[in-house]
Structures are given as structure tokens and as C-alpha cells.
Image (cartoon, rainbow, N blue to C red):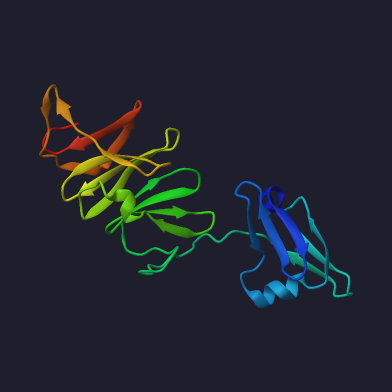
Amino acid sequence: SSDVCSSDLWLATHPKGVLIYDPDTKHISPLFSDTVLQKKAGENNMQIYCDRDGIVWLTYWDNRGIYELLPYKPSVRFYPVKPNTKDSLNSGIGGIVPGDRNQIWLGTSGRPTIFNSNNGKFEVISEKDLKDIKGNDIYPIYIDTSRQKAWLYGSPQNLVYEMNITTRKCLPIKFRDGTKQFDTLNIEANLAQPYHNGLLVYDMNHGF
């Protein structure tokens, strides 16, 4: 599509070949993931031209001719589970909520995982950040990007925590009816919704 080359900056470099710079994410990526094709398309490249129809033309100073490229983004990309592998998805997904700009928070076994769609990397939140949370499985239920707060749910203890995304410090949330504190919660994490400056949750024992 035409917006691919209109928003990105295409660079003919040596010896890395044609590189694409995204000014929004400040991320640089090669034109092709195939290293052989990347080298062939970028070798002796003299100029790059993107026309108004979104077609990219590569020209060469060695009388090779002109390459015509039709930029597109794949409709599907698969991220397999790779246990104990850095920057990868380590386990199955039990929940998913949108985070801050191109981030997705995933509920995975044991600890939440943050997926960055810009670079395709997964970050498992460390155990030290979650040391104040009780529960074998911890899931994100809502992310407030403007206030930089995340609400997490610890199971099977059924407790809700508020995390400061910047500092990663977690504090338990206490639910009360007047002076009476609810200590037998059974919260449906997937029903949590933002409400004013806080969170509206559904507890099967007490209601909303």
C-alpha cells in the first residue's frame, strides 16, 4: 500500500543493503529477511524511488536494470511458544489486554508477559517485581496507559493488585462495604472494565 513508503524512510546502504526506517517507532529493519535476497537487491544500488501508487523502484549503477517492488505487510505472523528462551513467548496464553503504544499484556502461566509488536519481542515480568503478589498464576486485567497503572489478578487466591508500570511496585487492593472488608473474593478477571479513575470488577460472591 502507498502508506508503507510514504511514512517510512528507505535507505540504500553499503554493505547492509536497503534498510527501512520507521520514524514512529525509530526502528530500522532490512528490506528482506532473506539475507541472500537482501544482499542481491541492495548490491550496487544507486537510488530508491517510491511513486504515488506505492510502488518502490530500485536503480543500479552497474547496468543491471530496475527492480520493481510492491511493499506489503504480511496479514499473519506466527509466534510459537519457546520455553526458557529470551525475548520469546514462554508458555500458553490465558488472557490478553492492550497496553501502552504497540504493547500487549498477556496472561501466561506464572507471570504476565508484555509483547512489543514493534520488534516482536516478549518480556516476562520478573519475579522480584511480583514478590508482593500472592498467587501461582498472575494475569493482567486492565492497563491504564495515561496513569501508567496496571491491574493484575492473582489466582487461586483471587486478589487484585495495582502495579505502577514505571516502578513495577505492586500493592493489593482492599474491597470494603463500609467498614466491612471482603476477604472471600471470587473475581471474574475478564469482566473487569475501567470506571472513572479506577476499575470496575465483578465478584461472584458480592456483585460489582
For residue 95, say whether it is visible. no
For residue 163, say whether it is visible. yes
The x and y percentages for residue 58 are 79, 65
Q: Extreme top residue here?
A: 178
With respect to residue 22, does 181 lie above or below?
above
The x and y percentages for residue 109 are 27, 59
Query: Residue 108 lies in what quarter of the image?
Result: bottom left
With respect to residue 146, does 121 lie above or below?
below
The x and y percentages for residue 24 are 62, 46
Q: Residue at x 42, y 50 (%)?
A: 104
With respect to residue 133, does 198 lie above or below?
above
Q: Extreme bottom residue here?
A: 36
- Give the side of residue 105 with respect to residue 206, left or right: right
- Give the side of residue 203 with respect to residue 93, left or right: left
In this view, the residue in front, 192 or 72, is 192
Q: Residue at x 20, y 33 (%)?
A: 174
Query: Residue 18 lies in what quarter of the image?
Result: bottom right
Query: Residue 195 lies in what quarter of the image?
Result: top left
Quarter of the figure with the C terminus: top left
- Give the side of residue 119 with respect to residue 145, left or right: right
Q: Residue at x 54, y 54 (%)?
A: 118
The x and y percentages for residue 92 are 31, 62
In this view, the residue in front, 153 or 54, is 153
With respect to residue 160, does 124 lie above or below?
below
